[in-house]
Image (cartoon, rainbow, N blue to C red):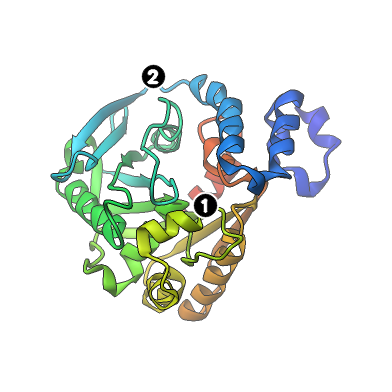
């Protein structure tokens, strides 16, 4: 490892190249440079690369409680990941993506279990949320489901070793949009719970658009419609003035088109609103999916960066 590291530039020290086989690194690079040509097919390649690495992790010290209902809908379900001996531990709540119309908290028994599992190994109680999808559930259903889940967690997480007064929200892609909407947008009709202490948004859709270049424009329309005025009003980036929590914003180097620019825009506006630059990171060498698929593998730089943010 040290010999390989010495041959890499400083900018590449946190690259997935350090942690993947040469063959898998070549596969990842191949889909990275063509990411937006076929996101669904390229996502499948990423899951094929990282699935075995995630499954190889030793999670024996973590107890998993599956499919606990937090509401009346069949998708109002969550999983809890509790480290051995947990008592009053901070709680990391993860909300998966899926372009508003698809996705689940556990794609194949590995992704996205890997995110709360990694945090459980760091001493957190991890929670993975499933929620209703468009077009059956339209804006602001995602934020409203998150509100239901957070209330359930605050009421019950003590029974699973968590501290109901220390809840951190983490959302990826559409899940990042739902986290930001829940915290910032008064039009959702829900108020953020007092237990929220910080938020992490990874590759979030922080501006809702149906631009021709958006590979998920139809999915956005399924959730919010295609009226430009409505999309503008419902975009989390326009509500950053309501942010009263520390927030970390992350984007991948190879993003779903426009999401990197929206993440930068959100971070800039958040800095203006809070009077200081927010924590921000670009995950070099990663794409929209691998930005979270690499959790609970040997590559943990981003996770460590999050821990530093939470300690700051």
Rendered image: mark on residue 308:
1
Give x and y (percent) for residue 254: 66, 50
Q: Nearer the viewer, residue 202 or 156?
A: 202
How far is the residue under mark 1 from the one under mark 2?
A: 25 Å
Left or right for 83, reference 202: left
Residue found at x 42% / y 70%: 235
Give x and y (percent) for residue 153: 21, 47
- Quick one: label 2, few (<14), some, or many (20+) residues within 10 Å? few
Q: Nearer the viewer, residue 18 or 312?
A: 18
Residue found at x 25% / y 42%: 162
Residue found at x 49% / y 73%: 270
Give x and y (percent) for residue 117: 41, 32
Q: Nearer the viewer, residue 80 or 96?
A: 96
Secondary structure category for the residue under label 1: helix
| Residue at image mark 2 | 60
Residue 291 shows in this picture: yes
């Amino acid at each position: 490892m040290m010999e390989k590291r010495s041959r890499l530039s400083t900018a590449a020290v946190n690259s997935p190249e350090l942690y993947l086989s040469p063959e898998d690194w070549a596969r990842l690079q191949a889909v990275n440079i063509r990411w937006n040509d076929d996101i669904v097919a390229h996502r499948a390649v990423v899951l094929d690369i990282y699935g075995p690495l995630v499954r190889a992790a030793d999670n024996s010290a973590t107890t998993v409680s599956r499919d606990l209902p937090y509401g009346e809908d069949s998708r109002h379900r969550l999983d809890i990941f509790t480290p051995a001996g947990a008592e009053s531990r901070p709680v990391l709540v993860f909300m998966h993506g899926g372009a508003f119309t698809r996705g689940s908290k556990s794609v194949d028994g590995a992704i996205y279990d890997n995110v709360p599992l990694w945090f459980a190994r760091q001493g957190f109680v991890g929670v993975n949320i499933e929620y209703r999808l468009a077009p059956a559930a339209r804006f602001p259903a995602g934020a409203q489901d998150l509100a239901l889940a957070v209330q359930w967690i605050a009421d019950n997480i003590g029974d699973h070793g968590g501290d109901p007064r220390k809840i951190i929200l983490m959302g990826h892609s559409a899940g990042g949009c739902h986290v930001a909407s829940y915290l910032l947008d008064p039009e959702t009709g829900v108020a953020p719970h007092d237990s929220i202490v910080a938020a992490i948004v990874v590759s979030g859709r922080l501006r809702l658009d149906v631009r021709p270049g958006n590979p998920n424009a139809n999915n956005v329309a399924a959730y919010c419609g295609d009226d430009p005025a409505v999309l503008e009003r419902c975009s989390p980036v326009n509500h950053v003035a309501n942010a009263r929590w520390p927030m970390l914003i992350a984007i991948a180097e190879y993003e779903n088109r426009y999401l990197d620019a929206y993440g930068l825009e959100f971070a800039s506006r958040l800095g203006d609103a809070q009077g200081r630059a927010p924590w921000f990171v670009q995950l070099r060498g990663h794409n929209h999916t691998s930005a979270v698929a690499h959790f609970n593998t040997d590559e943990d730089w981003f996770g460590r960066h999050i821990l530093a943010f939470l300690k700051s």
